[in-house]
Amino acid sequence: MKLYYPQDHYNAAHRGEVFPLLKPFLKAEGFTDAERIKLYGVSQQDYTFVNSIQEAEVVILPMSWNYYIEFKKMDMAMALINKAKEHDKMVWTVNLYDIGVKLKGLENIKVFRTSGFRSKLPNWHIGRPVFIGDPLFRLNRLQIPFSYPKFRIRPLIGFCGLASGSKYKRHMDLLKIMTKNFLSMIDLSHYERDTLLSAAYERFGMLKQLELNKEIDTVFIYRNNYRAGARTHEDREASSRDFFKNIIASQYILCMRGAGNFSARLYETLAMGRIPIYVNTDGLLPLQDAIDWKQHVVWVEYKDKDSLYEKVLEFHKSLTEEDFLQLCRANRQLWESKLKMASFFKYHLAKHKNEDNIIDRAKG
């Protein structure tokens, strides 16, 4: 696949804003292809970076929309998009952060994003996974042995993370969202509006509902701050150990949105061969045309949150021991084959080629 990006857009000081597929190739001198494959799953042989838009099959806007807006470089972004349009080329872009920036409709772009509301976004906004390193490598470094969970008659549900029953914190969360929404509404903010919802408070209520049910076993670690407020390397390592040990000890993991309308925990749970309890808040899940998500998770609509425990028990009781183990293995395989960065973009590049072929045949 031939890709083009303008090198003068790249700002190494803001590497976190780089389009994900470019990161493996924008590395310091001496970074080897073997290291690239190990860290990112892509090789120098997988892509050809060309020097002009005319040669490219896909044009990439190197930095995130957040970057171009915050640093007042929208003219630079639009110049590339307009030039690509002149040559009938599609531009791939990325919208980062918990809340996406507002974008007007453009004919020749795709926006890859983790956050957002599926029912409110046009089809040129594309759901993408949270790209994570393989947790099995992390487990090995933390000296935590990996194995698939054993089947039990009673479901065993885990959670380690921010979940608070504080009404004061809930009110403060809602006040922050209302303020941001108001600024967005009067166009004093470039960011989209969000649902009035305190994720930490909602999680707390769901966890307590599960904890109080006598047919369910739980291993919950409640945090009052993100990553337990870790500030030092040692604190971060300790919080990571707790997090990964909690998933390993569980069969199911509650995956409810956070500050943004997505769950990074969803992908960590799949990658570790566990079953997510996915609370759907109109999320923009990736590859919905290729993945039957309801076959891989306990799917619970947000409006049904008060019967969460019933959904979990119904799902668990429908599985035989063999079904359960197959699903755990299938979830790990799903992450490896479709939700890692390399496999995700490989799918979309193949889809892009197919769409181009259809357009060419129609023109012919």
Image (cartoon, rainbow, N blue to C red):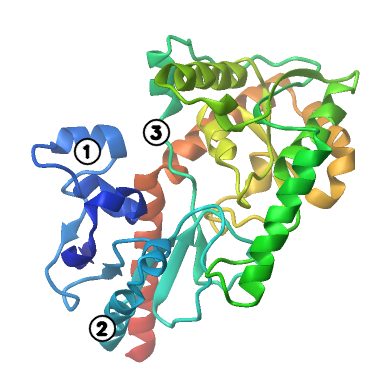
Closer to the N terminus: mark 3 or mark 2? 2
**Residue 92, percent across and down?**
36, 67
Closer to the N terminus: mark 2 or mark 1? 1
> What residue is at 57 percent from the left and 22 percent from the top?
243
Answer whether labels 2 and 1 touch (C-beta < 8 Å): no
> What residue is at 75 percent from the left and 57 percent from the top?
196
Mark 3 neighbour density, 10 Å: few (under 14) some (14–19) many (20 or more): some
Q: Does residue 120 appear to the left or right of 11 in the view shown?
A: right
- Mark 1 to mark 3 CA distance (whole Å): 13 Å
Q: Does residue 154 appear to the left or right of 50 in the view shown?
A: right
> Taking the image as drawn, is residue 152 in sight?
yes
**158 up-or-down from 126: above or below:** above
The amino acid on which the numbered mark 1 sits, given as a three-letter code, is Arg
> Of helix, strand and loop, which one carries label 1?
helix
**334 up-or-down from 11: above or below:** above
Mark 2 neighbour density, 10 Å: few (under 14) some (14–19) many (20 or more): few
- Tell me the residue that label 2 is attached to: 83
**33 up-or-down from 147: above or below:** below
**Residue 206, percent across and down?**
81, 35
